[in-house]
Each structure stands twice: as C-alpha cells, then as structure tokens.
Amino acid sequence: MDGPYIRVEDSGLMTPLREDVTTIGRGRSVDIHLTDPSVSRLHAEIIRRGPYAYVTDLGLSRNGTRVNGRLVARRVLEDGDVLSFGSARCRVFGIVAEEFSAEVELRRPAAPELTRRELDVVTSLCRPALSDEAFVAPATAREIAADLVVTEAAVKQHLLRLYQKFRIPEGPNRRVRLANEVVALGLVRPLPPTEKSLTAPADPDASAAPATPAAPAARAPRAAGSRSAAVPAQASPASTVAGSAVAAPSVAAVS
C-alpha cells in the first residue's frame, strides 16, 4: 500500500491515512471504525502535515489514547508505532523516518486573545464535554444561545470568529475540534472530580445509573404515657455505590 496507512490489529483491516485528517472511533461516520466498547464514538484523529503525522486524543473519552503504551494527548508518530484507543489496538506504517525524537510531544501554540463574550461562548461550548459523562458532544449553537440568553445568530457569528482565531479549518466536526483545542490550551477546565466520579465504571458511552435513594428515616419509639409526638431520627446517609449518578462538574474559565 502506497503512503501512510493504519492497520487494525484485531481484524487486520488496513486503511490509508487521509491527506489531512483521519478520524477514529466507534461512530458510523468516522474513517477508522472500531467496534470495541471501550472506544468512544469520536475518539481521536490522526493529522498529516506534509511528511509528518501525529495523533490527537479528542479528550472526550476517559479511556484515552496511548502510543506504544504511553498515554498521550498529542504525539508525533513514527513508522510501526502501536496506537491504543481504549482497548482497541492499531499500528501505523508508511511514515517516512526522520532524525527527531518522537518522545517529544508537539508544542501547543499560544492561546489567542479572547473577548469576554468569546470566553463565555467557549466555556458554554465545552461545558457538556467536561461533565462527568464518559462521552458528551460539545454544545450546539442553539444550546449556547439558550445558556447565554442571546440569539443563535449572534452565537454563530462568535463561533465563526473563534474558528478563525484558533485556525480551525472548515470540515466535519468543526465544533468538536474547537472544543478540543480550547480544552488542550487550558482555557476552560472542569473542577476536580468527586469521589463518586472516581469510582464510576470506565464505559465510554454508558449513562450513569440512578442514585440509590436514602433509607427512610427511622422513627423513635413513643414513650409510654407521653402525649408528645415521636421525634423522627435523622436518616443515615446512603452508602456510596459505584456507578451512582454524579452531577456534572462546573467549568471554571481561565481569564
């Protein structure tokens, strides 16, 4: 096969990498379709820049992306590298070798200067993706408009300017790319996860189970001959259950 390509280890399927961006995940519209349940619907991208290629984890799956066993956010690829998306394993071939260290990740560009309103828009855009859900798509223009109490047309104008500032090219999943870049640059971030979220299962798309209701309050026995009503005892707190529902963490904006 001419040019760089990726091979799925389980099936042996070989697919050439696109000239620009190759999407990988469990969804129907991705370029490299993986069926493993630990893979998110849109898990990662392999981006080509001339003779180079690098993998970018989209940050929307708690199972992550690994290169040769190392968890990465963005990393330059070499010929023969083993990529793990969740539990699914792939290998890349056909990448031209060059004398540079693949251990060095690509430097993130400096964050562009944003207005207060633009920062509000990107915060609202990323809020669903930064929740405790394993995979949640970024907010739509309509959802952002409702969150900020502005018109949808105004939000779309802000998004167009943000695409230009962050140099997000036209094409599919443009909002996802913008949200991924915003999170990668640290412009918005979730608060630290709660204890319950740390004990939740690592299923990338499973919805959280409903919280276990607290036990009914026990009533203190009525004293013999007493005219006063029995005073209810305090309810004991419900025990922590792995997989219980956890409220989505709020997103802190970085000025």
Image: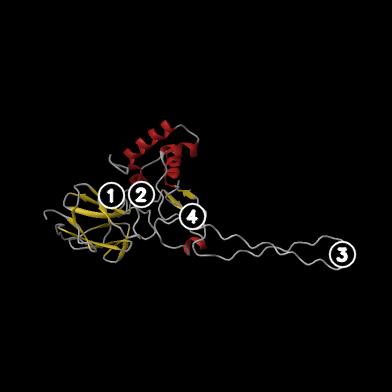
For the N terminus, give its image quadrant.
bottom left
Whether residue 116 can be seen here: no
Foreground mark, 3 or 1?
A: 3
How far apart in space, not on screen, are marks 1 and 2 (Cα)?
Answer: 17 Å
How far apart in space, not on screen, are marks 2 and 4 (Cα)?
Answer: 17 Å
Residue type at the position of mark 2: Asn
Q: Label 1: which residue?
A: 30
The answer to whether residue 198 is above or below residue 46 is below
Residue 137, x across and y down, in percent: 39, 47
Residue closer to the observer: 166 or 82: 82
Q: Residue at x 48, y 49 (%)?
A: 252
Q: Secondary structure at mark 1?
A: loop
The reply to whether discs 3 and 1 touch (Cβ–Cβ < 8 Å) is no
Answer with left or right where residue 86 lies relative to residue 120: left
* Chain-order first, disc 1 or disc 4: 1
Residue type at the position of mark 1: Val
Residue closer to the observer: 168 or 141: 141
Q: Label 2: which residue?
A: 180
Q: Secondary structure at mark 2?
A: helix
Residue 54, x across and y down, in percent: 24, 55
How far apart in space, not on screen, are marks 1 and 4 (Cα)?
Answer: 31 Å
Residue closer to the observer: 180 or 239: 239
* Chain-order first, disc 3 or disc 2: 2
Foreground mark, 4 or 3?
A: 3
* Chain-order first, disc 2 or disc 4: 2
Q: Label 4: which residue?
A: 191
Whether residue 27 can be seen here: yes
Q: Label 3: which residue?
A: 226
Answer with left or right where residue 92 lies relative to residue 176: left
